[in-house]
Amino acid sequence: MKTLTQRNKKMALLCAISFLNLSIFALAGEMKEADGTGSKQNRIEIKDFAFNPQTITVRAGEKVTWINRDEEPHTVVSVEKQFKKSTALDTDQEFTITAGAPGTYTYFCSVHPKMTGTIVVEK
Amino acid sequence: MSDYISHDHEHDGIDRRGFLHCMAWAGTGLLWTISGGVLASKTLAQIAKAGAPLPATDLSFLQISDSHIGFNKEANKDVTATFKIALDRINAMPTPPSFLIHTGDITQLSKPEEFDTFDEVLKSCRTKDVFYVPGEHDVLNDGGKLYRERYLKSVEGKGSGWYSFNKNGVHFIALVNVLDLQAGGLGQLGDEQLEWLEADVKGLGTSTPIVVFAHIPLWAVYPQWGWGTSDSERALGYLKGFGSVTVLNGHIHQVLQKVEGNVTFHTAMSTAFPQPAPGTAASPGPMKVPAEKLRSMLGLTSVQYKQGKTTLAVVDSNLS
């Protein structure tokens, strides 16, 4: 009986770890064409070397889209490498990811590292 | 600084000292003579006009910067054309430079076709030797792989592409400060490069003139806009004992300079588009200027060294 309980605990822990990993990977980004189908409410505009809004709160599973309105290329790179980085976005180019596990994700522009932003993902 | 202009070749009575002093900060054509850490100035155009060739020197080289091939917006929709004009100016110099240095941002978006265009246009330059450092625009998506394959053929690049070489008794150091940048930070050299630098200059005599070049300024021009390098102090620490250190940078598309002890810092104009003076705009993005004014805000930089002197002459000249 005691052995079974321990095994169950171990299984539960393993499941939890697997789930956590899956959730993190679910935030993996993908490049999207600027076709306007992205979620309207979760848009981050890159303008004057800044992410606007600088902090955005979204729900897990929602899409987050950046659009570069500067004449300078910018990138979107997760500080902790928690989601796939964008390529350099030229003027009016977009980049979209799908928000995964709840948590706080910081990112920056690897070309102009002074530019930083935060995504808060809620359940 | 104006104390070092000793001749009025044209006898035109113009108060050249004051005039040039103003022009320095407007980013127009200038000759900077570095003498004991003090700068003097004279325009390249005036020297050419007077028919007098530049004084004989043991070494002269030219800095071009921020050509941004591929950029096609206001205020310059044809950056290839202005780059060509810069090369025409080099070809027309009475004393051709021994070599060129390009202080980065060859391209706008690191695209192979942009590098191709640059290489093709550069063929028209009669000076064939070119030494490069990358700008952040040259290493956008591949960590600089394509840049290194193309532009480090004639040198032994270390790490992400830094190197040094000697010419006529001057020691040149090419540094890379646009890779592996950290969130919230500035340009960065990194430990590996700094350790290399320390070893690189260790065996040199302190009278060896040093020229350091890198894309992002190695001094805190305006950190709010990212115009600085987080670990440049450490790099300069290794150069403290040398009598003459000249630091040449690009990135900010305007002439700015500072003298600190034995070190002269100097930034060059772009051949593509100007950027605003520190803090004078909402962002450091391309500055929109009237078409007729554009070429006066683009340019190149000539540097001359005469053996036996600790001084290097640095000349900025615009494309108008």
Image: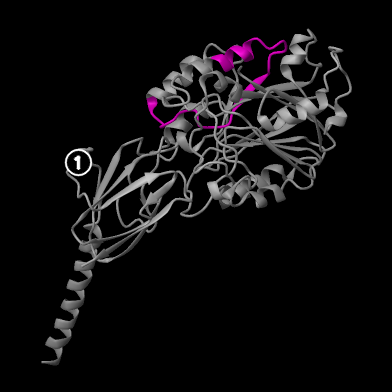
Type of amino acid at the residue the image marks with label 1: Gly
Residue B100 among magenta residues? yes
Residue underneath mark 1: A36
Residue B50 among magenta residues? no
Which quadrant, please, contains the N terminus of chain B?
top right
Part of the protein shown in magenta: B85-112
Relative to B127, say whether B246 is above or below.
Answer: below
Residue under the image location 22 percent in, 60 percent down: A100
- Per the image, label 1 sits on a secondary structure element best described as loop
Colour theme: one colour
Please give the chain letter of the residue carrying mark 1.
A
Give x and y (percent) for residue B292: 55, 18
Q: Is residue A83 left or right of residue B289?
A: left
Residue B211 falls in which quadrant of the image? top right
Give x and y (percent) for residue B140: 41, 38
Give x and y (percent) for residue B254: 61, 32
Q: Is residue B280 visible?
A: yes
